[in-house]
């Protein structure tokens, strides 16, 4: 198969992990007889520096014209003081909206060799394998008005949590469909005791349940969900939730896997190119040192092979190669134990490819 992949390395450790993921995909193409063409483009701080905007039009056009997009990370401390609209993160948010990738899939898996790197006890870690389905193009991230208002009493600030029923319904449907393909258990997370949007979320989940009677549905308030993820993560199969709740809960979920450097993601829409990126950010504290963990980027590439290209054997091969290096005791610094000699990003990339 011939596939065109747009690569957006972005900022910080993004270029380091993405370069290794591209090499891995090139190796997959050789081994399985495919042709993958890669085109690089700017996003985030790198785009501001090169083109004066976090999301150049050319980047959007390239992404839309490709079969899938591989992204590294966005964000850089030097932009912390500016308005939200000019920050590197605005590039990523704008791209998600432009591609209409409304569903962000974040699988939380504890790889057995990494159990020691998790802050949770062994007995809590059995059977931890769930996926968070995060709504990605609505809610507080995109709602308007969003403003600072100077009043007689001082500054007031406004963010808006806005969802249409249609946006809520399409993400809940996907949650049900993914649950049907997995363990048939769906946990819908909201804050229905406080938020109007959450009440509509819960009503919609209940209404749709009639169409998915084989799926067991339960509701959790987001504060309880945060507690349950550390108390008993094995209880979950599929969690579906709105944008901000999903962002927070998936970082929490990442920590139980040992490191946020292990967590991949796929952002999918209604037929356009999917966007694949590690959940971790640009990690400016280690950027340029060549020590970042590329495994989340590799696992994101595996999700691309599976979800965008239908290349199941190829995706399995990448995931097995990641499991093998972990079983062999190879570790980057973030997942290394006391006796381990951490590998560099490039050394880990080489180990997974061979
Ligand atoms: N690779 C993920 C990344 O770069 N995240 C930075 C970011 O913009 N995060 C905002 C969000 O995902 O909600």
Image (cartoon, grey):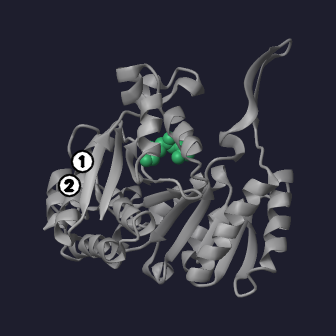
- Residue 310, x across and y down, in percent: 41, 71
Q: Residue at x 46, y 59 (%)?
A: 265
Residue 348 visible in rendering:
yes
Q: Which mark is residue 19?
A: 1
Q: Secondary structure at mark 1?
A: helix
Reading the image, the residue beneath label 2 is 23
**Does the CB distance between marks 2 and 1 fall below 8 Å?**
yes
Judging depth in this view, the residue of 183 and 301 nearest the camera is 301
Q: Which mark is residue 216?
A: none
Q: Is residue 349 left or right of residue 296?
A: left
Residue 120 vs 248, above or below: the answer is below
Q: Is residue 183 left or right of residue 9?
A: right
- Residue 336, x across and y down, in percent: 25, 62
**Location of residue 36 by image quarter:** bottom left
Determine the CA span between mark 2 and mark 1. 6 Å
Q: Residue at x 78, y 77 (%)?
A: 209
The quadrant of the image that shows the C terminus is bottom left
């Amino acid at each position: 198969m011939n596939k065109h992949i747009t690569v957006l390395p972005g900022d910080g450790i993004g270029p380091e992990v993405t370069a290794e993921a591209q090499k891995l995909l090139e190796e997959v193409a050789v081994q399985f007889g495919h042709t993958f063409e890669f085109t690089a483009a700017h996003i985030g701080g790198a785009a501001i520096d090169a083109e004066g905007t976090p999301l150049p039009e050319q980047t959007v056009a390239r992404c839309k014209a490709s079969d899938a997009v591989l992204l590294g990370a966005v964000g850089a401390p030097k932009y912390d003081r500016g308005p939200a609209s000019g920050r590197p993160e605005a590039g990523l948010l704008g791209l998600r909206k432009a591609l209409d990738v409304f569903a962000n899939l974040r699988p939380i898996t504890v790889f057995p060799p990494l159990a020691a790197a998790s802050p949770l006890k062994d007995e809590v870690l059995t059977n931890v394998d769930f996926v968070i389905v995060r709504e990605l193009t609505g809610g507080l991230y995109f709602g308007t008005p969003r403003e600072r208002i100077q009043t007689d009493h001082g500054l007031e600030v406004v963010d808006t949590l806005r969802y249409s029923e249609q946006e809520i319904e399409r993400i809940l449907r996907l949650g049900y469909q993914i649950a049907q393909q997995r363990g048939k258990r769906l946990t819908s997370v909201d804050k229905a005791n406080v938020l109007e949007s959450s009440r509509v979320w819960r009503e919609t989940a209940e209404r749709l349940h009639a169409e998915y009677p084989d799926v067991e549905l339960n509701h959790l308030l987001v504060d309880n969900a945060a507690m349950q993820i550390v108390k008993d993560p094995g209880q979950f199969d599929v969690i579906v939730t709105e944008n901000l709740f999903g962002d927070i809960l998936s970082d929490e979920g990442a920590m139980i896997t040992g490191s946020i450097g292990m967590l991949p993601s796929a952002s999918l829409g209604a037929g356009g190119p999917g966007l694949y990126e590690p959940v971790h950010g640009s990690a400016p504290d280690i950027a340029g040192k060549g020590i970042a963990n590329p495994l989340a980027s590799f696992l994101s590439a595996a999700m691309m092979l599976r979800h965008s290209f239908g290349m199941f054997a190829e995706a399995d091969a990448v995931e097995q190669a990641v499991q093998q290096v972990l079983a062999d005791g190879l570790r980057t610094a973030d997942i290394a134990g006391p006796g381990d000699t951490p590998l560099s990003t490039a050394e880990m990339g080489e180990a997974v490819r061979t």
